Image (tube, grey):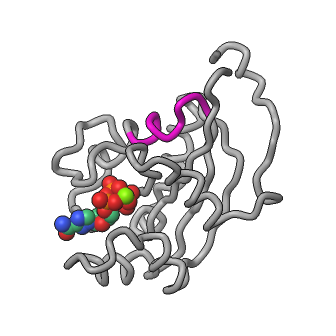
Amino acid sequence: MSDAERTFVMVKPDGVQRGLIGEIISRFEDRGLKLVGAKFMQISDELAHEHYGEHEGKPFFEGLVDFITSGPVMAMVWEGQDATRQVRTMMGETDPAESDPGTIRGDFGLDLGRNVIHGSDHEDEGANEREIDLFFDEDELQDYERIDETWLY
Ligand code: RTP
Ligand code: MG
């Protein structure tokens, strides 16, 4: 694989409560992306502020922090060619109303503030690595080959 990349993905509290973890993992597995890290966890107030730091000061920021800390999330790292962009395409737009059917937000979301999933921004250089570092220690990420990799690349 020429440009293998790792990206950070998280099923948000609404996705967990609605029982969408398995569905979302299946979509990434089916696409050929490889799961290299996963953690079912509660985000602290401090971690939420750090993770969404780019939005600090915006009118929706405090609501966003309250929401992302309101229940457990499924934090994950997925690997594959151009993984950050692939995941963002599969997620749809920030606003579910603008997301095409077939995308995760287009299939499962209705509201901008309850949009089921987070993925690293592919237009923000290095956001994927920053977010992976924020949520995972190096020894929590697995190096292995998936048996179908020969046929994916
Ligand atoms: P995320 O970071 O959660 O994956 O979402 P995103 O990249 O698609 O969108 P971003 O611009 O990073 O915004 C982060 C989250 O803040 C909420 N939001 N509310 N105008 C608003 O009320 C507004 N804008 C953004 C969304 O829930 C979005 O996912
Ligand atoms: Mg974002």
Residue 139 in percent (x, y) is at 83, 59
Name the main secondary structure of what is drawn in magenta.
Answer: helix
Left or right: 66 as drawn, with respect to 147: left
Q: Residue at x 43, y 62 (%)?
A: 15
Decide: is 53 above or below 34.
below
Q: Quadrant of the C terminus?
A: top right
Quadrant of the rendered image holding ligand 1: bottom left
Q: Residue at x 31, y 84 (%)?
A: 62
Q: Which residues are magenta?
A: 80-88
Note whether residue 116 is visible: no
Answer left or right for 147 relative to 91: right
Please name the residue shown 58% across and 28% down the image: 81
Asked whether 86 falls inside the magenta stretch, the response is: yes
Counting from the top left corner in percent of width and height, residue 11 is at 48, 59
Residue 84 visible: yes
Q: Is residue 3 toward the left or the right of residue 55 in the image? A: right
For this rendering, which residue is in front, 108 or 134?
Answer: 134
Residue 96 lies in the magenta stretch: no
- Please identify the quadrant where the N terminus is shown: top right
70 vs 97: above or below: below
Residue that appears at 33% across and 39% down: 103
The number of numbered discs placed on residues in the rendered structure image is 0
* Occupied quadrant, residue 33: top right
125 lies above or below 63: above
Across and down, in percent, residue 151 comes to 67, 13
In the rendered image, which quarter is residue 138 located in? bottom right
The foreground one among 64 and 1 is 1
Left or right of residue 17: residue 77: right
Q: Position of residue 110 (x, y in %)?
A: 21, 57
Which residue occupies the extreme front position in the image? Answer: 125
